[in-house]
Image (cartoon, coloured by chain):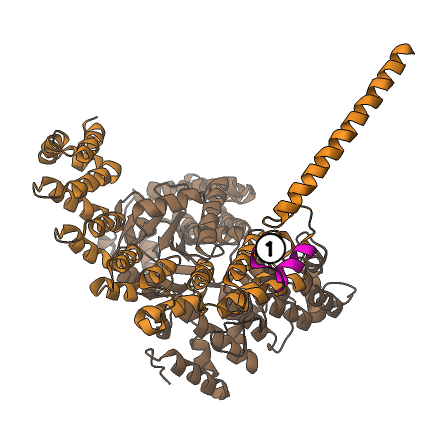
Amino acid sequence: MSINPGRSEDQFRSLVESLIDDPNQHAELIKLLGEDHAIYDQRGTATVNRMRGWLLLAFARKQLPQAALPFVLEELDTGVDAYLVAAAAAALRTYPERNQAFAPFVVRAISNIRYRDENVSLQVYGGFAIGVAGTSPVRELLETLVWLGPSALAVVPDLTTLRDGPPALSKKYQPHVAQALEAIGVVASVEDDCCQLPESVRGFFSSLRENRTSTKQLDSTVFEDQDGTSLTFGEFFQGRPSIVAFFYTRCDNPLKCSLTITKLARIQELLRTEGIADQINTAGITYDPGFDLPERIKNYGRHRGVKFAPQHRLLRAPEGVDSLRKHFKLGVNFIESLVNRHRIEVYLLDREGQVAASFERIQWNESDVVGRARELLMEYENRNASGVTRSSITSPVLGSTVALALALFPKCPLCWAAYMSFFGIAGLGSIPYSPWLQPILAILLLVNLASIWFRARSTGRMTPFYLASVGAVALIASKVFAGLDPLGTAGVICTLAGSIWSAIAATNRRQLARQ
Amino acid sequence: MTTRRKTAKKTKAAKKTTKKTTKKSTKKTTKSTKKAAKSRPSARRSPRAALAVATSSKESSPRRVAALQEVPLAVCENDENLNSLLNILRDRNEPIKVRLAALQSIQAASFSVIAFESCRPDYLAALREIVDDPDPELRQRVLGILARENDSYVQQRLLDGLQNPAKALVPPEKALQLLSYDVHAESYSVARDIVDNPPNPDAKREALRILAADPNSAPVFEKLLTDKDENREVRQISAAALQSMKPRRFQERARQMLLDKDEYDDIQATALTALTQFGDQKEVGQDQELMKQVDKLGKGKSAKVKKTARRFLMRYKA
């Protein structure tokens, strides 16, 4: 079913009411929660809030499906609109499971909204309370804590602060706080997996991209940084992994863009502390390049602690917002050039500029992002190392082949004849006797020995080197002194064993380092 | 001992004198307080007593207004206090001066964000109830408070009024000014319509101030800036808007205006000031034609242009 984006608000309200009554259409309703849905294009922020609030309330009247849960938690985490937060709190109470991880979201929402509290009506589209009727987001959130009951045990200290202060909630909410504390009751112990969201839900907030999409559509995108310097996507994002956050300076939600850029500055600090600031790029890209001119983003970043450097910039794409939206699948929509709603989004790009991981919707932890970036860096080191692994596998093969060739190398034309006859080939005159081949094989044997020595030094295991050395000495001796052919065979075996042992030791060490 | 006795006598005498003086001054103060109490608030009255006076319809309006000035700290002490003030505010039969004083009192209480936390929801809901009040002053003040809260109900009512003057709560210029508090107030398209077809010059100016944050409106500002027949204040607003959105384009236009011998003095002064503050040091400094022209302007008749030209030359010739 395709939804006409040009619907009026009245039509939208009717549409939601009809879809919610048909469980087969709930997937359509969940699609409507995406910020980038065409239905929000060219609508103002207040209109978008009314529409999204009505969607959440529709779920609140039935049952909140798991696919809509991330949107509800996002609203609790960073929402500052009273109607939306109240609707999210009401919707959460219809989720089939009381999960312990929900309680911190609810308490955080109380902190975010308590000084913006106002009366709202959840029965009405848009929800403005006129007069003194209606509920309020704080009341709805406290009711949600009552619903969570013992599952909200982890937030008892926060609730106690809300009861006793400072800063305590106002007197009129105290009965609700008491009710929540009573509903939680006294539970003997908190389970170990206390505040973990279900795995399926966690995946919505932070994910690894298995299939990385090509950056072809961004190749022509020209960025301008905070100093007005122009550069292409490839020039900045290719060659090193990058951490990219999206923002715009006119964002009026202090829990979104302003906090995101402050956290980006903190990420830079962590990268510097770990000594990898020159190996990983950081960038903040504005959604609003028409307004966010270089000087504006420079001041915005500077006031939030961003330290600018060639690898660390704030960027605007004056002509490329659409291609950025497509490539990153950005959760944003606009009214004219102004953002009307966006989600929090931070991406990790690999060395080719492809999206390798993302952190979306709820505020992310700086250390987690740096940890993922470090993994991405290691991915390349490992890839390079896997080249070494191949050579380390081929090395014993090469070493052993060289050893075998040296052992079996014919000493004179007669020996060649013997070999040839052994393989049933006739024609002595055409036998190519190459006495120069023997010293070459000897040199190759020494090269193999040297590589084993280097590997032995890095792994700290010298036995493979000693074994291969004994093998080499035995082989050379078997060639120099007549009648020591069995020693040659022993030399081949020792060289082969030393080479293989050395390769295995090096592989094990790399795996340990990766862990 | 003798010294001690003398000191004690002196102290007693001093105390007597103080008592007499205090009695006299108290008598005087009581008389003057009684007189003043009729017109100004009493410092000794408890908030409860002040509220009793403020909410009593038997009291005169000046006494109620004076009492209301005393109560802000008590507004959020309990629901009863708040409701009594909100009732005055909502009641169209109350004298307007009393209602305005009630609004002022609650507004003063709202500055203490933490203490006001419990009052805020009912206060905002009550304000929404009176946005249609027949008294224009009260209505405008209420709209102002809600607009500063980025209240989307009020924004919608103001937009409706701009699109349909029959529904207007305030004059269009005031509505635009109130909408300009929130960049996300969906007002760009309405503002553009008003610029094209302004109900009055003030409304046009306010609409332009809103559009000054809309990058899509840069061509409109460029056109207004270069139109010599346009109102000078409008051209100055356009200069500021274009400089903020398209600084390079503005620099080009400012150069043209400075080289134009027929351009108005105040517009040239604006262009000079903007280039002095925000111009590209290298590009402007190396523009010999422009420097010569500014030299000439510095020796011209207009004092304002001379002053700004001097500042310009100080920056670019240094």
Q: What kind of element bears circle 1? A: helix
Identify the amino acid type marked 1. Arg
Return the residue nearer the eye: B49 or A283. Answer: B49
Q: Is residue A335 left or right of residue A484?
A: left
Query: Which quarter of the image is occupied by the N terminus of chain A?
Result: bottom left
Question: Extreme right residue here?
Answer: B1
Chain drawn in brown: A
Q: Is residue A448 left or right of residue A139?
A: left
Q: Is residue A11 left or right of residue A159?
A: left
Whether the magenta-drawn stretch holds residue A312 is answered as no
User: In the rendered structure, the residue with mark 1 lies on which chain?
Assistant: B
**Residue highlighted by disc 1:** B63
At x 44%, y 69%, the residue is B134
To which quarter of the image does residue A349 belong? bottom left
Residue B159 image point, x, y percent: 35, 68
Residue B168 image point, x, y percent: 36, 69
Span colored in magenta: B48-63
Return the residue nearer the eye: A127 or A54. Answer: A127
To which quarter of the image does residue B154 belong? bottom left
Residue B285 image point, x, y percent: 17, 33
Chain drawn in orange: B
Whether residue B161 is situated above or below residue B110 in the rendered picture: below
